[in-house]
Image (tube, rainbow, N blue to C red):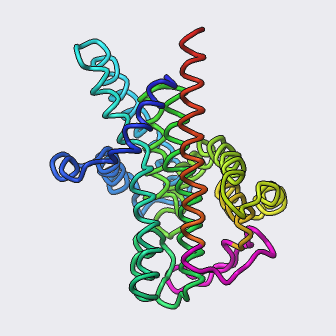
């Protein structure tokens, strides 16, 4: 199925997910989100004890995975069996990675800072991060945008393509469901600490291979970007990735920070609460400017081309087996 992933990446790279189609039928993530919301509202009862809510969260995740895999498998089989169906399958698969939209949103932050100043930059970055942005200076806005680019390139581009290559549309859609569940219920709030435990742990597991692959892609991409350092990226991964609060996000963030010689992550505020976090790229330059976002986008764009090329090679090799 690496051919499907390869073609889906190419289609999405150039077209993205059309706005007219989103307005007409929504997006697979919105459909998955509705199911998660239904499971959350029905099975996550505040009157239950912690153990019961944790057990119901495991059950909800199992139901979510079963429904998404079954529907996707049937759809894939049907499309492969009808005329022009394979083309439709590629278009459906192209809705899973998010190369174009990720680049656009991150570029908007740099453009807003450059042309409209700090308030516009804060507004733009607030659309892609969950932290408090009201008090961020330019360096912090840039840091937030680059962190989001690095982490979301891993879980929004590499991971769905990876799993699609492993198991076709069902595996790619199942990954997307797991990632959506983590973003909706996988956080440590009073309501979701127990119910979302399974979603958070499962998302950590399925993102593990993609985060390592993304870090490797950033290291290689640094070879082709002026003033970027692949050696420093490797050193940052070895030194800093393990110190991140997430078992996966530290890999792409450390690679990006090391490649550009900057410091990412560190303390930040969510909902008025200051969260202490280690720096990725420890000792790197902390006074970031909007040009650093453009440099990070260069690395991500080259990494994307490397990913597409890798999947193309794997598709050829699998075709010959």
Q: Is residue 123 above or below residue 63?
A: below
Q: How many marks?
A: 0
What residue is drawn where x is 32% and y is 27%? 89
Q: Is residue 146 above or below residue 161?
A: below
- Magenta span includes 318: no
Question: Position of 248 compared to 12: left or right?
Answer: right
Residue that protrudes farthest toward the left in the picture: 24
Q: Residue 244: image x %, image y %?
A: 72, 64
Question: Position of 291 compared to 71: left or right?
Answer: right
Q: Nearer the viewer, residue 210 or 86?
A: 86
Question: Position of 177 compared to 92: left or right?
Answer: right
Q: Is residue 131 above or below residue 185?
A: below
Q: Residue 316: image x %, image y %?
A: 55, 18
Q: Residue 213: image x %, image y %?
A: 66, 43
What residue is drawn where x is 69% and y is 50%? 215
Position of the C terminus, as image quadrant, is top right
Question: Residue 15: which quarter of the image?
Answer: top left
Residue that protrudes farthest toward the front in the picture: 226
Question: Position of 178 compared to 299: left or right?
Answer: left
Residue that protrudes farthest toward the top in the picture: 321
Res. 30 visible in picture: yes
Res. 173 visible in picture: no
Q: Nearer the viewer, residue 134 or 272?
A: 134
The residue range painted magenta reads 264-291
What residue is drawn where x is 60% and y is 83%? 139
Q: Residue 75: image x %, image y %?
A: 30, 24
């Amino acid at each position: 199925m690496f051919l499907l992933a390869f073609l889906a990446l190419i289609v999405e790279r150039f077209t993205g997910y059309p706005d007219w189609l989103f307005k007409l039928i929504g997006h697979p993530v919105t459909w998955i989100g509705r199911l998660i919301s239904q499971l959350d509202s029905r099975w996550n009862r505040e009157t239950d004890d912690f153990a019961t809510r944790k057990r119901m969260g495991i059950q909800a995740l199992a139901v979510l995975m079963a429904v998404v895999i079954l529907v996707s498998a049937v759809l894939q089989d049907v499309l492969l069996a009808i005329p022009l169906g394979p083309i439709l399958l590629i278009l459906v698969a192209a809705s899973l990675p998010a190369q174009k939209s990720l680049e656009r949103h991150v570029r908007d932050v740099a453009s807003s800072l450059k042309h409209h100043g700090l308030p516009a930059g804060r507004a733009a970055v607030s659309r892609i991060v969950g932290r408090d942005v009201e008090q961020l200076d330019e360096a912090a806005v840039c840091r937030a945008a680059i962190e989001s680019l690095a982490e979301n390139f891993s879980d929004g581009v590499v991971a769905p393509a990876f799993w699609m290559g492993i198991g076709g549309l069902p595996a790619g859609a199942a990954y997307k469901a797991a990632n959506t569940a983590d973003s909706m219920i996988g956080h440590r709030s009073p309501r979701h600490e127990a119910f979302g435990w399974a979603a958070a742990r499962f998302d950590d597991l399925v993102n593990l291979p993609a985060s390592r692959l993304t870090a490797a892609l950033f290291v290689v991409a640094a070879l082709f970007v002026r003033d970027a350092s692949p050696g420093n990226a490797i050193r940052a991964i070895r030194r800093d990735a393990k110190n991140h609060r997430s078992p996966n996000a530290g890999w792409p963030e450390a690679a990006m920070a090391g490649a550009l010689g900057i410091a990412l992550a560190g303390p930040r505020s969510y909902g008025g609460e200051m969260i202490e976090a280690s720096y990725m790229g420890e000792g790197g330059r902390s006074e970031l400017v909007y040009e650093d976002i453009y440099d990070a986008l260069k690395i991500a764009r080259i990494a994307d081309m490397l990913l597409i090329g890798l999947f193309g090679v794997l598709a050829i090799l699998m075709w010959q087996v």
